[in-house]
């Protein structure tokens, strides 16, 4: 089979490898599509400094079960599946030791390969109304939005949700929020992208480039109350404004590092607002299954910006880094 690995200079190199065999409790997935996330750019940056030689990147895959190991009774050959972000976080609360089980990170190879081996419990059935390009968008971006807004934030109809930008996580948040009947306020650097966000269900649009004090606009739009839920993706450059825009009793869902790590906001306001911060690291296989059920129930399709071929991995990374995308960037591995 063909796989991609970073070389010592951080360049992606396609190599030959033996097709792996599933062990007890495992399945082999023939990968049809993978999707890229901002995290993959961070891993590429690390690879460029020589930190990840030999690492196979990328976390998100969808495909079909191609072989089944002993002791697997919940998956069958030919079944279409989506692979969960963590091999080990199946259900329940997060545990720190799950962290090293994330695909395509500092500790473990990823899914940019024609075949992968996954624990049978760490794959979910592919929603029947999605193709594999759409399904591969779910494991990181979709599950992160679901875990933050629904499992932790308990978002419901009548709430007000603020989303940062029009990338993968943000558009899942927008679509989930709009489907539930929440009011969605979208931020973007592009008026054209804001119009597309409106078509997806955003009711209020703010260009954060031309309106840098967007927190004040959110307060104005909500009669001074603020947003009950903020999908905080920007990091240090946006965190304080996100807090300023948060409503009493609300939840700031802390996810993103688009402007770097380690925000140092003034948290005093949280106390007087009786508000919460939900820190999120993607989510579990259970969250993936719940999200799949929700997308099916509401006939929602993830937003796909562009699909590249398997031999175009470097171009796909460049496309994501240029940040002109709206939604998800994918690579088709095989059909
Ligand atoms: N904690 C977790 O478990 C977790 C999981 C998934 C993602 N993340 C993080 O969440 C962030 C988004 O990830 P993603 O994969 O969805 O990224 P993405 O698809 O690459 O989205 C990037 C988009 O974010 C918007 N953006 C950039 N800087 C912004 C800013 N200062 N304010 C508002 N919007 C801004 C831009 O949208 P416009 O072009 O519309 O301006 C840009 O196109 C990343 O930092 C990622 O590392 C964290």
Image: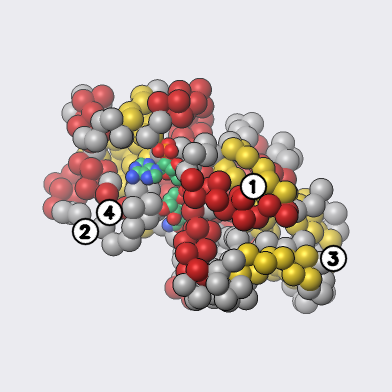
**168, 301: nearer the viewer:** 168
Q: Is residue 274 left or right of residue 256?
A: left
Dot placed on the residue nearer the N-terminal end, 3 or 4: 3
Q: Is residue 240 left or right of residue 186?
A: left
Disc 4 designates what residue? Answer: 236
- Quadrant holding the N terminus: bottom right
- How far separated are the C-alphas under marks 1 and 4? 28 Å
Dot placed on the residue nearer the N-terminal end, 3 or 1: 3
Q: Is residue 98 left or right of residue 161?
A: right
Residue 333 rendering spot, x and y as whole percentages: 75, 53
Residue mark closest to the camera, 3 vs 1: 1
- How far separated are the C-alphas under marks 2 and 1? 34 Å
Residue drawn at point x = 62 percent, y = 76 percent: 54
Residue drawn at point x = 30 percent, y = 34 percent: 209
- SS at circle 2: loop
Disc 2 designates what residue? Answer: 264
Dot placed on the residue nearer the N-terminal end, 1 or 4: 4
Disc 3 designates what residue? Answer: 67
Dot 2 alpha-carbon crowd within 10 angstroms: few under 14, some 14 to 19, many 20 or more: few
- How far separated are the C-alphas under marks 2 and 3? 48 Å
- SS at circle 1: strand
Residue drawn at point x = 50 percent, y = 68 percent: 48
| Residue 62 in sight from this viewpoint | no
| Residue 206 in sight from this viewpoint | yes
Disc 1 designates what residue? Answer: 330
Dot placed on the residue nearer the N-terminal end, 2 or 4: 4
Discs 1, 4 touching: Cβ within 8 Å: no
- SS at circle 3: strand
């Amino acid at each position: 089979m063909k796989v991609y690995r970073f070389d010592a200079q951080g360049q992606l190199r396609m190599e030959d490898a033996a097709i792996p065999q599933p062990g007890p409790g495992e399945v082999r997935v023939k990968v049809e599509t993978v999707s890229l996330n901002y995290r993959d750019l961070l891993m590429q940056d690390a690879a460029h400094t020589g930190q990840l030689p030999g690492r196979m990147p990328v976390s998100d895959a969808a495909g079909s079960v191609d072989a089944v190991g002993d002791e697997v009774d919940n998956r069958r050959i030919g079944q279409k599946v989506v692979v969960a972000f963590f091999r080990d976080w199946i259900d329940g609360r997060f545990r720190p030791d799950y962290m090293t089980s994330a695909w395509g990170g500092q500790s473990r190879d990823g899914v940019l390969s024609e075949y992968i081996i996954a624990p049978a419990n760490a794959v979910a059935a592919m929603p029947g109304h999605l193709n594999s390009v759409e399904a591969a968008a779910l494991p990181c971006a979709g599950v992160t939005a679901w875990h933050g807004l629904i499992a932790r934030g308990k978002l419901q109809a009548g709430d007000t949700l603020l989303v940062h930008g029009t990338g993968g996580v943000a558009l899942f948040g927008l679509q989930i929020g709009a489907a539930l009947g929440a009011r969605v306020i979208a931020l973007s650097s592009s008026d054209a992208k804001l119009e597309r966000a409106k078509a997806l269900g955003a009711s209020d649009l703010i260009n954060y480039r031309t309106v840098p004090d967007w927190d004040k606009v959110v307060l104005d739009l909500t009669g001074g109350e603020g947003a009950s839920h903020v999908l905080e993706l920007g990091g240090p450059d946006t965190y304080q404004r996100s807090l300023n825009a948060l409503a009493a009793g609300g939840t700031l869902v802390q996810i993103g590092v688009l402007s770097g790590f380690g925000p140092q906001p003034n948290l005093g306001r949280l106390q007087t607002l009786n508000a919460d911060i939900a820190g999120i690291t993607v989510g579990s296989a259970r969250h993936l299954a719940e999200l799949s059920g929700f997308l099916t129930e509401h006939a929602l399709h993830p937003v796909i910006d562009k699909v590249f071929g398997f031999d175009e991995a470097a171009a796909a990374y460049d496309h994501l880094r240029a940040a002109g995308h709206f939604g998800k960037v994918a690579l088709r591995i095989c059909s």
